[in-house]
Image: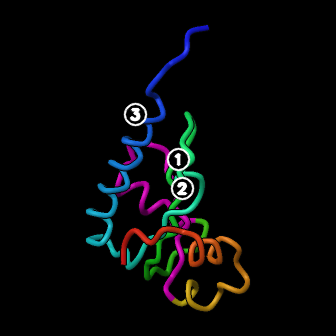
Amino acid sequence: MPMMYGFGTQRRQMLESELQRLVDEMPQLGMQSMYLVGPFSRGDVGPRTVLDLVVVQQTDELMHRRADFWTTHLRPRIGINFYVYTPDEFENNIDDDLLLQHASSMGERVYG
């Protein structure tokens, strides 16, 4: 079976480009801060690597509907998982939420 060389570099460039686009566009839509978490934040890039983003935004939407806003408005060009928290949730739930612990301690703050 033939091997494909340079795929990791190409995938990394795609992820970096999409992340920059989001950082440029999301503040206008209400994002207050954003953290990159998951494999890409650790430098792990493979064929299925996606952007895992913890987004802080003031919203009244239910937790399970919040990512829909970003997916609808931004139309991602690559796989993205949006984990959306209000500022109050982000500040007050760190002790109870492993994802927030990871974002604040090991995640890369990419905006805000």
Give the camera-side residue of 40 and 93.
40
- Which amino acid type is shown beneath numbered disc 2? Asn
Mark 2 or mark 1, which has the lower sequence index? 1
- Numbered disc 3: secondary structure: helix
Camera-side mark, 2 or 1: 1
Mark 2 or mark 3, which has the lower sequence index? 3
Q: Where does label 1 land, which residue?
A: 50
Q: Could you tell me which quadrant the C terminus lies in?
A: bottom left
Q: CA distance from mark 2 to mark 1?
A: 7 Å
For residue 6, side relative to residue 96 (left or right): left
Q: Where does label 3 land, which residue?
A: 10
Q: Where does label 2 land, which residue?
A: 81
Give the camera-side residue of 106 and 99.
106
Name which quarter of the figure residue 1 lies in.
Answer: top right
- The percent position of residue 66, horizontal first and vertical second, equals 51, 68
In the rendered image, residue 77 lying in the magenta stretch gets the answer yes
- The percent position of residue 55, horizontal first and vertical second, equals 47, 71
- Numbered disc 2: secondary structure: strand
Q: Which residues are magenta?
A: 65-87
Q: Residue at x 35, y 57 (%)?
A: 73
Name which quarter of the figure residue 70 lies in.
Answer: bottom left
